[in-house]
Image (tube, rainbow, N blue to C red):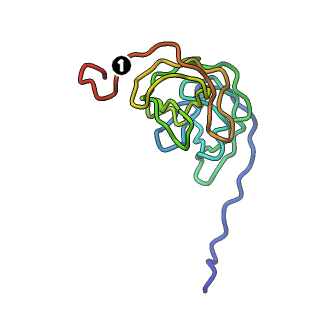
Amino acid sequence: MKKSKRKKQPESAIGFKEGKFEANQRGYGFVITEDFDVFIPPRQVGGAMHGDLVTVQVFCKAKGSFEGRIVKINKRARDRIIGEVEKRKKRKFVIPTDSRIFYRLLLPKNERVREGTIVEAKIKRFPDKSRIMGGEVLRVIGQAKDPNIQ
């Protein structure tokens, strides 16, 4: 196998910036700062959720683009989510209806809500690298199959 002769451009750290995290449903996102936008790959999201105010370590990539990793979540944008209850391997999760929230919320074992129910849930444990939140159901909104539920 022939190796490429092109050398990878070295990245250089240019410091830390604060901004708002804007997530994409595919797991990556951007931190919008006062000066520029910073691309955040999925492995560098660090448990941030769409809308959170974060601190990002910024690296200058080739051609003047910026990439980074979230090092601190300064303020959470939300403490509740709306989602559908799903059962996986004897555990119940709330899968957010907002596709920009790519973490699922684990419900307590004693939670008595049926699969396919749309609920509002309180986040008690925010996501980490495991991509799982913890929380509880605040209220039942309806059934996912109900045409009046959007």
Residue that protrudes farthest toward the top in the picture: 139
Which residue is found at the position 76% from the left and 37% from the top? 15
Q: Is residue 43 or residue 113 the one in the foreground?
A: 113
| In the image, residue 110 above or below residue 63 | above
On the image, the x and y values in percent for residue 41 come to: 59, 46
Residue that protrudes farthest toward the left in the picture: 147
Left or right: residue 58 compared with residue 118: right
Which residue is found at the position 54% from the left and 42% from the top? 28
On the image, the x and y values in percent for residue 18 come to: 67, 26
Residue type, mark 1 in image:
Gly
Quarter of the image where one finds residue 145 = top left
Quarter of the image where one finds residue 84 = top left
Residue that protrudes farthest toward the bottom in the picture: 1
Which residue is found at the position 51% from the left and 32% from the top? 101
| In the image, residue 122 above or below residue 20 | above
Task: Find disc 1 in the rendering and name its residue.
Answer: 142
Which residue is found at the position 70% from the left and 29% from the top? 55
